[in-house]
Structures are given as structure tokens and as C-alpha cells.
């Protein structure tokens, strides 16, 4: 019988991972979070912001982001990467295009390192962590601090958002029915 699989929790879930790299993409600032599954639960290993230099050409800024992400990947060796799906209102087309360039560099760095990537929309992230796709920023922050056992919300917001995205990957599973 051929192997069948289905996804629990999220339609974009990939294979189970122990170290997830969450990414909140942006051209000026890209938040990242490395979350590790341990015997004692989930733990934030590192969170930070990748920045591109204003004043450089778009090509140079995109290259900077890709290079910085490669450094993070080399240091932490994640099993998977979760990225916030591009979302934009029609009034902000230029912003969406610039963010798409940044996402491209980030996705290339992951693919080049052989890291599987999953994408989550903001609504999916909110729904998975709080039960509501319309959760407030405060509800999301509470969920992140509770899940990771933190005393304070990770800052800046880019890092907190990256934590939420990584948590989604760690909570999502792909189940192979042939081995289940």
C-alpha cells in the first residue's frame, strides 16, 4: 500500500522538527527566533533582528539579509524554517514588493542550506497559538511568553512575531499513515 500522509493543525506543516528558525521578514528589519524542543519543553535559544543598510542598492540590501541569515543558520543548524507569508493591502503595493525581495533572499539562504521551509499566514499563526485568527497583539504576546516560559515578551516586535512563527512549526506535524 502506498504511503499516505496528512497534516494536523496546519495545512502548511512539514515534517516534525526539534530546532525551528522562525522568520518575520522585512527589508529594513527581519526578526528571527531559534526555538529548540527539549525534554523540558520548548526553549528560546536566540532571538534577534537582521538589518539591511539604508542607502545601499536594493541588490546589496537583499544580499546583506541573505548573508546574515546564513550566519544564523550555520550557528544554530535548524531542522526547519518557518516564515510569515507575504501579506499586504492594495494600498501598500511598493511595501509588498520590497518585502518579497527580502523573502526571496531569506528563502534562498534556507534552500541553499537544505533546510525545509513552511509558510504561515498571520491568521494561521494567531489561530494556532490562541485559538482565534483575530487575536490581539496582547493575546499573542501572552501566548508566546507562556509557551516559552519567558518572564517578558521578546523585543522588538519582530522577534516576538518570529517566535510565534517558529512555535507554529514546532506545534504542527505531518503524520505518515504508513508508520502511524
Image (cartoon, grey):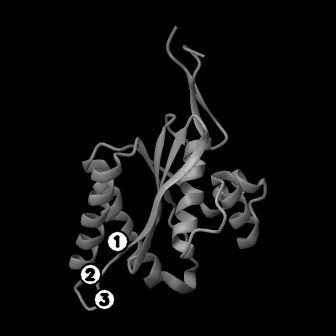
As drawn, 104 above or below 16: below
Residue at image location 61% in from the left, 41% down from the top: 41
Structural crowding at the residue carrying mark 1, measured as other residues with C-alpha within 10 Å and reported as few (<14), some (14–19) or many (≥20) = some
CA gap between label 2 and label 3 equals 9 Å
User: What residue sits right under mark 2 in the picture?
Assistant: 58
Whole-percent x, y for residue 151 in the image = 67, 64
Q: Contact, CB < 8 Å: mark 2 with mark 1?
A: yes
Residue at image location 52% in from the left, 84% down from the top: 92
Of marks 2 and 3, the one in the foreground: 3
The answer, for residue 52, to whether it is visible in the render is yes
As drawn, 13 above or below 84: above
Quadrant location of residue 50?
A: bottom left
Structural crowding at the residue carrying mark 3, measured as other residues with C-alpha within 10 Å and reported as few (<14), some (14–19) or many (≥20) = few
Location of the C terminus by quadrant is top right
Residue at image location 31% in from the left, 79% down from the top: 52
Q: Secondary structure at mark 1?
A: helix
Quadrant location of residue 165?
A: bottom right
- Asked whether 39 or 100 is in front, the reply is 39
Of marks 3 and 1, the one in the foreground: 3
User: What residue sits right under mark 1 in the picture?
Assistant: 101
Quadrant location of residue 51?
A: bottom left
Whole-percent x, y for residue 69 in the image = 32, 61
Q: Secondary structure at mark 3?
A: loop
CA gap between label 2 and label 1 equals 8 Å
* Residue 54, disc: 3
- Is 87 positioned to the left or the right of 151 in the image? left
Amino acid at each position: 500500500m502506498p504511503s499516505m500522509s496528512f497534516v494536523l493543525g496546519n495545512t502548511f506543516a512539514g515534517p516534525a522538527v526539534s530546532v525551528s528558525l522562525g522568520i518575520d521578514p522585512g527589508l529594513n528589519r527581519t526578526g528571527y527566533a531559534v526555538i529548540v524542543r527539549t525534554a523540558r519543553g520548548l526553549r528560546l535559544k536566540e532571538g534577534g533582528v537582521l538589518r539591511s543598510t539604508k542607502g545601499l542598492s536594493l541588490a546589496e540590501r537583499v544580499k546583506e539579509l541573505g548573508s546574515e541569515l546564513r550566519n544564523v543558520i550555520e550557528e544554530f543548524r535548524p531542522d526547519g524554517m518557518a516564515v510569515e507569508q507575504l501579506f499586504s493591502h492594495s494600498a501598500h503595493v511598493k511595501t509588498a514588493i520590497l518585502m518579497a525581495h527580502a523573502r526571496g533572499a531569506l528563502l534562498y539562504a534556507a534552500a541553499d542550506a537544505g533546510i525545509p521551509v513552511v509558510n504561515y499566514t498571520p491568521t494561521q499563526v494567531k489561530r494556532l497559538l490562541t485559538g482565534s485568527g483575530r487575536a490581539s497583539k496582547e493575546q499573542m504576546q501572552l501566548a508566546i511568553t507562556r509557551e516559552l516560559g519567558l518572564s517578558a515578551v521578546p523585543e522588538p516586535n519582530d522577534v516576538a512575531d518570529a517566535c510565534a512563527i517558529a512555535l507554529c512549526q514546532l506545534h504542527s506535524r505531518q503524520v505518515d499513515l504508513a508508520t502511524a
